[in-house]
Image: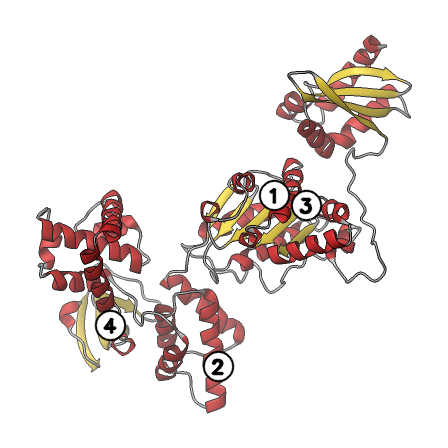
Amino acid sequence: MEGSAQSLWERCLPIIRNNVDEKQYRTWFEPIQIISFEKQVLTFGLPSQYFYEFLSEHFGRLIFSVVRRVFGEGTQLKYSLMVDQTHHLTVDIEPVNTQPLTPRAKIQATGSNRAPSPLQAPMPQDLDPQLNRNYSFENFIEGVSNKLPRSVGQAIAEHPKQSTFNPLFIYGASGVGKTHLVNAIGAKIKELHPTKRVLYVSAHLFQVQYTDSVRKNTVNDFINFYQTIDVLIIDDVQEFASLTKTQNTFFHIFNHLHQNGRQLILTSDRPPTALQGMEERLLTRFKWGLLAELEKPNQQLRHDILENKIRQDGLKIPEEVIDFVSENVNDSVRELEGIVNSLMAYSVVWNRDIDLPLAEQILKRAVKQENKPVTIDFILDKVCGYFNVKQEDVFTKCRKQPVAQVRQIAMYLAQKHTNLSLARIGSLIGKRTHATVLHSCSVVEDRLHVDKAFKSKMDEIEKLLKQLRIEDTHKKIEARVIVGNESEQRNLLFAQRGQVKLIGGGKPCKAFKVELFKPCGKGNLDTL
């Protein structure tokens, strides 16, 4: 009978080949072996459990239809899976006569008094994805600090079945937009693929649900439900730390979803390498796909976020206030939005316009940070002054110990206190490479751990950097800018040493002439 079954299966293969691409055919259909065909039960021999799950998930309907056409109506399928190659041990999967070979489980409610939960949703259309509809790609402002995770998130939303970025592990400090981004991904998937089962759940809620299932003896229902999800979003996975049983359960859910081509999106406040109390097998899976860091927004991105927030709220806030807030609030996006809300509230209660003095007053109360953005010029000024070294010597190739030390410290502090890249820092401090900057930072960090006297000096320099005052940040000069042969009058905000910002949409110029016509505060044109 095997010979007859083999010949019938060879009649099936050309039909299957016409419905899949050549690579899929060679990978998933050529390894299939015909074990037997008895009593209308066709037994396939497959090399592994994973092979079976993938084949049934992606090609189950095709195989079932073709086999029924060639072998006859009423034919059932059975699988013999190789589980131990060394000892040739196999396990049989009972005959399947449904169309997809791994149908999604329909979850039944177990108890009429159960509190509303996504676990109760039996059908895809009945599942509430638990997404925040206020978070979307449209109001997620793109900048240098978030370009990579945002682009990858959009790619996943458009093609959730592709496993290139599976799992997507997004990490970053609190308030940088992780929750916003993953909600935007989920919302976009639901928009483009309405039938997909998408679920957003915090790690804390996952733990609560799991604990509840253990108490009610419904762990299998809990696992079965999560194994039906197409796109699972887990927020703040660092909260799984030291929860061994929860980690173990999530490990099995993770494996099932990943093996079946389902998308996993995870967020954390730190990278996998810094997660303590997490099982190693989970950590290796977190690193399986793509690790994407959401960095703190730079000044330009903060400015854009503020403008978007102000526009959405229908507010009118002067440009100088927006500049001031974006320059001095750099911890998180939440803090930026909180400042805007505070400005609006104070303006309404006190019946006054939103202006710079009001912004300064609010920031003094609300912002716990350095008052003014630190620049490389300022760092060099303070470090050179502290060690009594001329700034011009720092920019030379001089390798004398005092000069080299100042250069290394300046690079270290620039990397710590500015948003500039290593390459940019190197170019601004003596035209060095990013490798030189990296080496300098490493040297300073190592010395801080072993040299108490040096650490004391660094602490004193740090204090000098913190002496920058808010009121000194906005010394202004209005000037006329002459660009080439064209004369254009533009307002300039002279915010800090060596920096001139064009107000009103003007583009920065490599060379221009400045003519003072209206001083409004202390300032020195020599610094331009």
Q: Which mark is residue 344?
A: 2
Mark positioned earlier in the residue sequence (1 or 2): 1
> Observer-nearest residue: 93 or 310?
93
Dot 1 corresponds to which residue? 159
Dot 4 corresponds to which residue? 467
Name the mark nearer the viewer: 3 or 4.
4
Return the x and y of residue 35 as percentages of the image width and height: 78, 15
Tell me the CA gap for discs 1 and 3.
12 Å
Which structural element holds mark 4?
Answer: loop
- At 36% from the left and 63% from the top, the residue drawn is 299
Q: Which mark is residue 230?
A: 3
Q: Can residue 486 be seen?
A: no
Rendering quarter of residue 419: bottom left
Q: Quadrant of the N terminus?
A: top right
Mark positioned earlier in the residue sequence (3 or 4): 3
Q: Can residue 110 be seen?
A: yes
Q: Amino acid at mark 1?
A: His
